[in-house]
Amino acid sequence: MTVHPSLQPVIDAWTQSVEAIHELVKPLAESDWNRPTECPGWSVRDVVSHVIGVETEFLGEPRPIHTLPRDLYHVTDEFSRYIEVQVDVRRCHTALEMTSELDLVILRRCRQLRNENRGPQTPFRWPLGSGNDQPLERALTVRAFDVWTHEQDLRRALRMPGDLDSPAAVLTRDFLLAALPKVVAKDAAAPPGSAVVFDVHGPLEFLRTVRVDAQGRGKIDSSVSLGPTVTLGMDWETYARLACGRVRPDAVADQIKVEGEPRLARTILREFAITP
């Protein structure tokens, strides 16, 4: 039995993005590994450490026994503490140690995924501390989303833009769009009858409308809305940075075009980030 057809595109997206990360960091000088990223408290080294750490857990490797320092201001809850262990344990690693470990992890994970013969709905125990099962397809989608997001963190830190329209970028777009009805209808509490349009341009262009029904539930579609309550226009990279919590709306206000009800627009943008 081979990889299920619905899993192959997700695996391919993850593979392209994680290999892009390897190509980005392989030639870096030692000092470049210390460049800050948009992830609070994390350098280039830390982002790569996080990618390595998560992939090792998907391989079934035991977590390192490590005590975190008390002065990590960005570690604020149990989830961030769980994530930080794999990062902090590698903060003393050299560039060569980092690239060598990344290379080996990618090799092993690619082999593991090539041999994947389970169906997309197979229950999968997420390794990142939640203790909850989820469908295998969902777990692999989240991994591709996370790796592409961190690829973009690295590209911005290193000033090496690219892959904004890659397979993983398209997967990320769809992943983020699936969260929009909740953002608009529940988190931002848009009133019943509202229509909120997102007009995004750049490497990935799309137009989506979230409509809030009489019961306050949000639904998303690609049709044009006449006289929407709010229209938010921005480029794709800004959309992704906002949705992934990399920047606050005030920091990129000059890159967002707002039309319609300003108070609702501000609330939607304030609730836009869906990642921890």
Image (cartoon, helix red, strand yellow):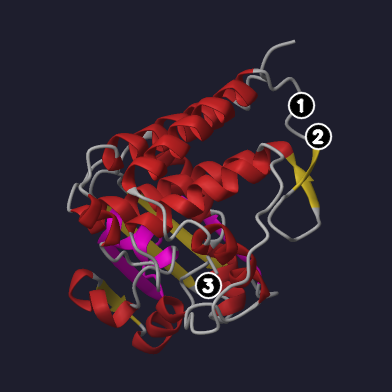
SS label for mark 1: loop
Pick out the residue farthest to the bottom. 263
Q: Which residue is mark 2?
A: 122
User: Please, is residue 7 above or below residue 198 in the view?
Assistant: above
Q: In the image, which residues are magenta?
A: 217-243
* Residue depicted at 52% across the width and 34% down the height: 105
* Residue depicted at 26% across the width and 50% down the height: 155
| Label 2 with label 1: CB-CB less than 8 Å | yes
Position of the N terminus by quadrant: top right
The kind of residue tagged 3 is: Val
Q: Position of residue 18 (x, y in %)?
A: 43, 37
Q: Position of residue 244 (x, y in %)?
A: 44, 63
Residue 237 magenta-highlighted:
yes
SS label for mark 3: helix
Q: CA distance from mark 2 to mark 3?
A: 31 Å
Residue 248 in sight in this render: yes
User: Pointer 2: residues within 10 angstroms few (<14), some, or many (20+)?
Assistant: few
SS label for mark 2: loop
Q: CA distance from mark 1 to mark 3?
A: 33 Å
Q: Nearer the viewer, residue 201 or 52?
A: 52
User: Pointer 1: residues within 10 angstroms few (<14), some, or many (20+)?
Assistant: some
Q: Which mark is residue 119?
A: 1
The number of numbered badges drawn on the structure is 3
| Label 1 with label 3: CB-CB less than 8 Å | no
Q: Position of residue 269 (x, y in %)?
A: 40, 77
Q: Which mark is residue 175?
A: none
Q: Nearer the viewer, residue 242 or 256?
A: 242
